[in-house]
Amino acid sequence: MSARNGRVQLVAVLVTLVLLHFYIRPRLFDGRLAPDFLLFALVIFAMRSGPGAGAVAGFLVGLATDALSPARFGAATLADTIVGYAAAWGRAVFFADNLLVNAGFVAAGLWVRDLIMLVASGTPQGQLLLELGVYSPLQALTTAAAGAFVLYAFRQWFAVRLDA
Amino acid sequence: MFPASDRGFSRRDTALFAGCMLLAVTALFTPDRITSAIATGLRQTVLAPLVWLQEQAEAGRGSRARLKSLLAERDSAAFAAQFLPSLTAENERLRALLGLSHRLRTPYVAAEVLHQAQVTDARMLLLSVGQADGVASFDPIVAPEGLVGVIWNAGQHTSVAMTWAHPEFRVSAFTANGSAYGIVAASPNATGSDAYLEFRGVPYRDSVVAGTVVLSSGLGGVYPKGIPIGTVMGVIREEAGWARVYRVRPAANPASTGHVLVLIGRRVGSVGEAFSSDTLEPSPRSDSMKVERRPRPAPPRATAPVPAVRPKADSTKAVPESTARPRPDSILRSPRPPRASPDSARPDSTP
């Protein structure tokens, strides 16, 4: 299969994830623990593209996030840029074609994203600790689980290994 | 097949990362005036399809529950409508007797909250209404339970709301019994579901008992008078021995609110009547304020006259004439209309 087909498949999955985020997630999930499909899309794109492309993708996703919910404009842009770049960097260190590694990347990316966003938006210490200690890990788990499901469904396209 | 990339790092990657970081940090320190314009522009152009998609999802999610609710309300309304003409007539007669004006009606638009999966979601909300619906900046947002926040930035079809959980949120408030005035703000120490508000600047002499409902005072011109903000839970701390800060349990929860009302147009004097009476104590009457102006015993430690910080008398004057309740003595002075027969006011007496 050519690289062009691979890119088309990646774009198809990314569009599906965007639709999941904006159309399915509000219908199925409620509250703070809903999986973040946008971040999952960012991580898998960054891991399969490169550090520069990952950073640019993170910048664009963060910009969209800031436009939709600007607690502090620029906070999500900064956070997602770092996460996009770090995800691309991480795939060079770990076995990025393993399902669990991918899910772990997503969970870690979400927690780091929340950490940067909370700090950059000037969150009080008490709330910051609660968010990072309780809600962010739980949302990271739901996002990683949803991401693992999507990767499993498209494992042929992403050449994901299921063994440990 | 599109496996994980094996491409290494290059100068181009580093330059792209550095450029994006620079832009992100610049955005972080850019004035709100510029960033809000950028955000609004993005929502109206590139992100418009995504916002529309989420609006459809939110509408679809709530449609089944709303259908059941609407059917129940329709049945109740059909039953109540049988008595409506006679009740309206009775209401008019009684209001004429008491010299009261008509109940205030505040123009509003209903909006859906488009929640984002972000850690800061409860502080800023995206609403599905904008300037095209008559919404403008600084329009108050209420839920059936009480105050949610204020419009921070209004786009053409969407708007961003600042909720009471935002650190910069402030609202002038008073207790439902009129005993204390102050400023309500989000607590900097609140955490997650334990988020609460602080009722600040309450003079030391004005103690507020737990369970007292706190309402917006209408001072400042942003929030109409009478919107429930929350319920006093107790004292948090004292400020320099002249004021107390009270802990207030918020009436409305922005994180779980799906639908809100945006109060638009000209500010009216009071909207207290619009909220359910079981969560709201009677609003202070001018005559009851008069009674409360009795000289109070001075605080034990006070050595100098305490400055009068409570704007009771002024705020009473500031209420528009059409909304102010008549003083009892003015009712007595005015010629009394003939009292209606009790029977004529009963709905079952109409032919």
Image: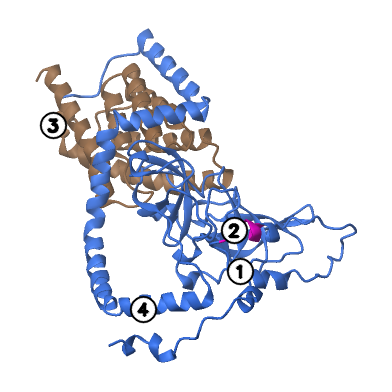
Chain colours: A brown, B blue
Instruction: Tell me the residue at 75%/68% (across/down).
Output: B293
Which residue is the site of mark 1? B284
Spot occupied by residue A68 in the image (x, y as percentages of width and height): 37, 36
**Tags 4 and 3 on a common chain:** no
- What number is the disc on residue B319? 2
Circle 2 Cα neighbour tier, 10 Å, few/some/many (<14 / 14–19 / ≥20)? some
Residue A14 within the segment the image draws in magenta = no
What's the residue type where badge 3 is placed? Gln
Q: CA distance from mark 1 to mark 4?
A: 26 Å
Q: CA distance from mark 2 to mark 4?
A: 29 Å
Q: Is residue B280 left or right of residue A40?
A: right
Q: Chain of mark 4?
A: B
Question: Do the residues bearing badges 2 and 1 touch, measured as CB atoms within 8 Å?
Answer: no
Q: Is residue B9 above or below residue B118?
A: above
Instruction: Give the residues drawn in magenta, as a range.
Output: B315-321
- What number is the disc on residue B87? 4
Q: Chain of mark 1?
A: B
Q: Chain of mark 2?
A: B
Per the image, label 2 sits on a secondary structure element best described as: loop
Question: Do the residues bearing badges 2 and 3 touch, measured as CB atoms within 8 Å?
Answer: no
Circle 4 Cα neighbour tier, 10 Å, few/some/many (<14 / 14–19 / ≥20)? some
Q: Earlier in the sequence, mark 2 or mark 1?
A: 1
